[in-house]
Amino acid sequence: MSTIAARIYAELRGDKAIWAIVALMAIFSLMAVYSATGSLAYQKYGGNTEAYLIKHGVILLAGLFMTYIFHLMHYLRFSKWAPVLMVIVIPLLMYTIAFGVERNDAHRWIDIPLTGLTFQPSELAKLALIMYVARAISSKQEYIKDFQEAFLPIIVPVLIICGLIAPANLSTAIILFFTCMFMMFVGRVDLKYVGLLLFLGIVLFSFLYTLGNFFPDIVRVQTWTSRVAAFMDGSGEVAQVTQAKIAIANGNLFGLGPGNSIQRNFLYVGYSDFIYAIICEEYGVFGGALLIGLYVLLFFRATRLVTKSPKAFGAMLAMGLSILLIMQAFVNIAVSVNLIPVTGVTLPMISYGGTSLVFTCVAFGIILSVSKYIESVS
Amino acid sequence: MDIKNEVLYRVYFLLFGLVTPAALTLIYYTVKIGVIEGEEWRDLGRNNFIVERDIEAERGNIMAADGSLLATDVPIFDLYWDPLTPTEDDFMANVDSLAHCFANYIDTDYTVGAAYDYLFQLRDTINFRKNRNVLLKSRVSYSEKKKIEQFPLFNLGQFRGGLIARKRNERKRPFGLLARRTIGYVRDQATDIGLESFYDEVLGGQPGTQMMIPLDRKRDLWMPLENLSSIEPKNGDDILTTLDINIQDITEEALLKGMQTHDADWGVAMVMEVNTGKIKAIANIERGKTGWYESYNHAIGTRTEPGSTFKAASMLALLEDGFVNLATDSIDIEKGRKEFYDREMEDSYSNSANLDTISVRRAFEISSNVGIAKLVQENYGTRTKANDEKAAELFIERMHQFNLHLATGIDLEGEKNPLIKEAYNTTDDQWSGTTLPWMSTGYELLITPLQLLNFYNTIANGGQQMKPLLVSEIQRYGQTVETFKPTVIKRQIASKKSIEQLQGLLEGVVANGTAAKLKTSRYSFAGKTGTAQIDYRRTDKGTRIGGYQASFAGYFPAKNPRYSTIVVIRRPRRAGFYGGDVAGPIFREIADKCFDSLTDLHDPIIEPTTTLRWTTNQLPHMDIGRREDMDVVLDYLGIEPSGDPETPLVVTMRQEGRDSVLLERRSMPEGKIPNVVGMGLRDALYQLENLGVKVKIDGAGKVVRQSLIPGTDPRNQTITLRLN
């Protein structure tokens, strides 16, 4: 056993702490998903919860394989990919709005021909945009505080991509928008331009909101307002949040133990949106805090990369991806503890869900690739 | 500012100014909800809609002595459909083929078109109905359910197709109406009866409970919750009865035949194992409006005046008190007519009219009422020194000594207590001058068939009274948890000598008395006939309803008896009314068949010293059968066949010379009349009836000729087979 572990360890390049985070999160994910899919499995597979465990395990393994592959690549390749990906992603997002598969009233998925699988273009768009922004920031470092030369070329794609994602998936768009904003902040963009970007974002949102009143099928304005309204007066859909709180309370300090969740039976999306509550229920407040700590640790390791090579594309890329992951994580957790309205954001690396999990793994792979080269330089 | 430092400041601002506070906020809120406000939320959690549901325990089996199932729980299913579960697409894609299956399997009253319309109607009117789930078919077996689950739409599963199967258990009696009242039933809106009732607690088990949570309350979908305490149902235990399937069957059949022959009101026949008191069979048959039923357990629940079968008890009292000496005593039966006080007693035996003084033994054998009544009246009628000045009190004491005043305590509900009057108790007109003589001949007392059988069983058992035993074991998952051993009620109801004398008298009844025509050379038996008048008292208008109760109680074989048996036939209307004519033959039929199964009592079959395996002219010829069967037969006969047809499912054999046999292929053309010549009737019928051909049979043995040529189209054909 130890020899196998040693061999795997020898295979892995890059920041071993990040590898450890990936491994720990994968274990959390398997256990929590296995627990939380109980009622889903009862409905679809007559109680065969292993069906979900196996399915999730396979996706997770595939994801970890992607992590491995991407971490082997040289991260400068991603810099070359960035513009190409942007060219692909924009029409793909348009196609999704027009012809995407409808699930829960949202056009977020497209069918991959011949495979029977579905795919969320917004996940790809996130990667593409972050690569593009990282490349732009690092290549324009010399004149980064210039409006026309640096600011405009960066913000136009951000506004386009976020504007295309927002109609069906507002929360993802907002997270992505803020990720880019923080990247620009780290990348020394003038603070007044960062403020301007925030203002432009609000303008874009207002425009979409107005548009939504004319085309409710495309822009889910009603969902947005109803969720926010429900959050404000604490009724309706928030019943799910109450169940999540009960789950956290059931867990108390040390949790009910693996597989003993009761609330999974009442949390209809306990395996994705509310998985944090299930983790708290089974592993207690300590388990929840440990998970939050893992995300913070990830971000901390990414800042180390930036401190080591502040101007490099790689550091900016790793920074951007870490910001994206931690923001997603915090938004998801904030929903479970009822700090913000219900969104559809998954807990990265933990939640059940194919596309999102695979792209999270790819993001980890890219971060590891960066860490590998930055370490070898220093 | 240094570029590097500017980047670092900004990164550290993110880390310490945003990320860390955000993380701490989230942890704080988690702690707040989970620990600080914890109790409040946990309380709310307990109010979650969890319900406790009973889980039906499986009811135990009732088994015959050999373990065959007399009553058992079989799971059945009620199939419901929720028309709102399937999506429009799923419904439209499958409704055609589902309608087809529906009309052909689920409800054949529907044509395919009607079923199609019906399915649409169900779906479209669902909002107007109270219950969304529509009962498609009830009482469906497991295999049928499996099949229906494979129908289009339904095969998508409960949550897409909407087919809901609700399981329940139904009581089944694999042997049909056999021993119906004794097995009994427990059901709503009816009095519980039989073993099912008496052993209800044992059989019933304990229902369990299960926490269920709603998946969808509108659709009444519930999911069991495993991690909350649930109590497993404790399944009921099985009871192993003493009933013998074969004897019960024989008994019911014999009784039914008798009932039909004599067109009686009701009849009882029972078989009991002498040494143990085990009840081997209880049959009750009653005339119903449309046929013959077992609708009441008269064997234990109906007490009647038994008539002459009770004379055995009177005789035993006389013997026990030493009032008669069978070797020397005689009695004047006064040509079968005598007045006791104001009532005339008459013998039912017609020859009595020519008889006066006969031996006491003879009086018993011909069942002379006058004879027995006079003996009892002379010895117990007045207070004398011989009877300790007790008179009738002594006679009643003897009845009590024989336990004839007590119920047997059989483990069935509804056993009636017998009625033996209290001597000289004149309240309520109980006792009169005529009570004693009439009682001695089986009137003015009431007893059930079972109680009388128990008395005869005791006689057969040499005086040791056994408790009737109906259940011998309680089993749990095939393991015995409780055994009911044969129980002795009374070690000796009368002296050995008296019992032996009475046994002799009962043998005499069969040898040369009222049951003489029933005797057989195969085995000996003993018993007593009874022909009781019923409704003999005249009504106010002077009319008499009349009628008789014919009975026979006895045991077999006469020496070392195995079984005691009673047959009671109430009010026969046809073909005689004497106990010996009506009940006796039924007794014989039961005894005959029981004796067949008592192989240890049979005369040994003389085995031939040398076994002739075959002779030339018995060599198999033109026999058809499966190749492997043939090989077994030929191997046994020691014949090496010639010829080895390749794929013969059916093979003929032909004699060739003196001692060899040739195997040939016999082909069976599919869908055409086959050549069945040479086949046994069973094989031939199987072949032909599978083709739908009507078969007429002429003769017995193997088929030697068939009326249709092989290869004929079998449709709408009738074939005549000649057998030889």
Image: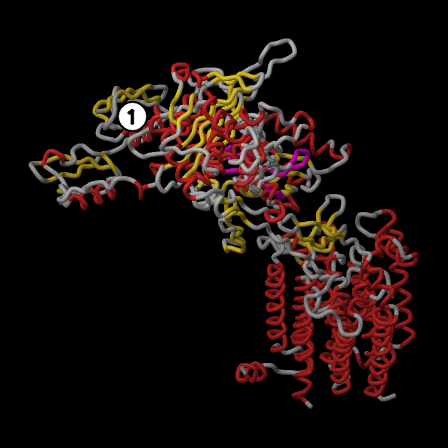
Quadrant holding the C terminus of chain B: top left
Q: Residue at x 67, y 73 (%)?
A: A78
Q: Position of residue B695 (x, y in %)?
A: 32, 22
Task: Tell whether B420 sits left or right of B242.
Answer: right
Is residue B251 shown above or below A142?
above
Please say whether residue B173 is one of the residues in the magenta stretch.
yes
Position in image of residue B212 (x %, y %): 72, 53
Q: Which residues are magenta?
A: B167-191
> Counting other residues with Cα less than 10 Å from the Cα at mark 1, is it few (<14), some (14-19), or many (20 or more)?
many
- Residue where numbered disc 1 is placed: B673
Q: Main secondary structure of the magenta part?
A: loop
Tag 1's secondary structure?
A: loop
Which one is nearer the viewer's eye here, B469 or B186?
B469
Q: Is residue B710 magenta?
A: no
* Chain letter of disc 1 in the image: B
Tell me the quarter of the picture where residue B15 sits: bottom right
Nearer to me, A212 or A22: A22
